[in-house]
């Protein structure tokens, strides 16, 4: 038997795994993200970067690094907005992506070359182990929901006993410790937050890390594990033998057909994530809804600047896209933003 976290990691990152190949995100893919919704997501983060430099926490020659960047759209949007808001910074800032998947690194390098030519260089790293920097402004969008997790229920955790067949068994020591710490009865226990935070801290002497994901401070009292397939949300357990009524199962879909071909994800337990960073010497700078975080970063002011410089049709189109980021009914409330800092003066 193997724990569910190993099964999930194989689904996403194993040979032929979902994220080992370049995936389309947006209308033609399995899901939307904030990056695919509007370039003003990156614009708001660019404003935050400039504010952090103006504040003096990070120097003008800091590394701006995105972790898990898909094709590099978000980082490229940040470059574009830095050019608009503070072009002189492009003479000193360095830009990097930390991306374990080779196919994605090739796509990121090609996209930056196509977008900026020789004007902006991009550093590519497979992981944090080959990075040793004095400072960094780090960002990530929807990466922690893709860390392998254990599924726990009433003192037990899920194992794959046979291919696509699952049973509950004894919890391992780490899972048991997290269950006890947070009083979990049923749901997900993420694995890897602690080592990820430690690796980031070893790579950068001082950093600000801005990340967005869906979830809450308190864990849901039930399973949130689910599969995204062509914008259809499928509860994981609906495809297992734990559901015996065939009428309750999605038609013409199975774990065999969806494995590594669709995204599998779950809600982030942000208190666990925050504690993992605190244990590794970081400070929680802010935790807000995505709506509140992007407004704090200045997205409204950026949209006002756009309105003053383009025609009404163009402005309205961009405004409609940006509304998806902050609309409480879409991403604004369900998604959360977190800022961590290490190396306060």
Image (cartoon, rainbow, N blue to C red):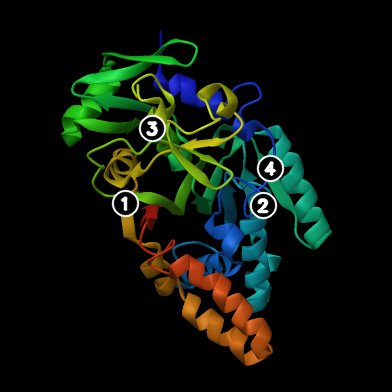
Residue 244 higher or lower than 56, as above or below: above
Q: Pick whichever, 243 or 329, lies toward us.
A: 243
Residue 110 picture location, percent across and down:
80, 48
Name which of mark 3 and mark 1 comes first in the sequence.
3
Disc 1 designates what residue?
283
Residue 91 higher or lower than 133, as above or below: below
- Camera-near label (3 vs 2) is 3
- Camera-near label (4 vs 3) is 3
Q: Secondary structure at mark 3?
A: helix
Q: CA distance from mark 3 to mark 1?
A: 45 Å
- Which image quarter: residue 105? top right
Q: Pick whichever, 54 or 171, lies toward us.
A: 171
Disc 4 designates what residue?
124
Disc 2 designates what residue?
72
Q: Residues within 10 Å of mark 2 (few under 14, many from 20)?
A: many
Q: Residues within 10 Å of mark 3 (few under 14, many from 20)?
A: few
Q: Residue at x 24, y 29 (%)?
A: 178
Disc 3 designates what residue?
248
Q: CA distance from mark 4 to mark 3?
A: 45 Å
Q: Residue at x 76, y 40 (%)?
A: 106
Q: CA distance from mark 3 to mark 2?
A: 39 Å
Classify the position of the C terminus by image quarter: bottom left
């Amino acid at each position: 038997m193997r724990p569910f976290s190993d099964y999930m990691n194989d689904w996403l990152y194993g040979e032929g795994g979902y994220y080992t190949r370049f995936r389309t995100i947006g209308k033609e893919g399995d899901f939307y993200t904030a990056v695919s919704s509007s370039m003003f997501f990156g614009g708001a983060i660019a404003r935050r970067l400039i504010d952090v430099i103006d504040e003096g926490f990070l120097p003008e020659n800091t590394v701006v690094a995105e972790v898990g960047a898909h094709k590099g759209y978000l980082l490229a949007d940040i470059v574009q907005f830095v050019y608009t808001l503070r072009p002189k910074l492009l003479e000193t800032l360095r830009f990097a992506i930390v991306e374990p998947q080779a196919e994605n690194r090739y796509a990121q390098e090609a996209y930056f070359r196509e977008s900026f030519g020789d004007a902006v260089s991009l550093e590519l790293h497979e992981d944090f182990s080959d990075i040793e920097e004095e400072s960094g402004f780090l960002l990530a969008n929807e990466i922690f929901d893709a860390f392998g997790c254990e599924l726990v229920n009433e003192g037990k955790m899920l194992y794959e006993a046979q291919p696509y067949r699952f049973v509950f068994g004894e919890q391992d020591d780490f899972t048991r410790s997290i269950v006890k710490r947070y009083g979990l009865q049923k749901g997900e226990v993420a694995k890897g937050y602690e080592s990820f935070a430690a690796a980031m801290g070893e790579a950068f002497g001082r950093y600000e890390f801005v990340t967005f994901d869906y979830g809450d401070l308190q864990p849901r009292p039930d399973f949130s594990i689910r599969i995204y397939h062509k914008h259809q949300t499928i509860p994981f357990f609906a495809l297992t033998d734990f559901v015996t009524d065939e009428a309750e199962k999605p038609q013409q879909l199975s774990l065999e057909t969806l494995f590594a071909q669709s995204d599998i994800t779950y809600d982030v337990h942000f208190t666990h994530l925050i504690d993992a960073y605190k244990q590794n010497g970081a400070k929680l700078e802010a935790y807000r809804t995505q709506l509140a975080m992007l407004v704090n970063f200045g997205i409204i002011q950026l949209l006002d600047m756009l309105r003053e410089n383009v025609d009404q049709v163009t402005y309205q189109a961009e405004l409609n896209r940006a509304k998806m980021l902050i609309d409480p009914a879409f991403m604004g409330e369900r998604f959360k933003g977190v800022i961590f800092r290490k190396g306060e003066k």
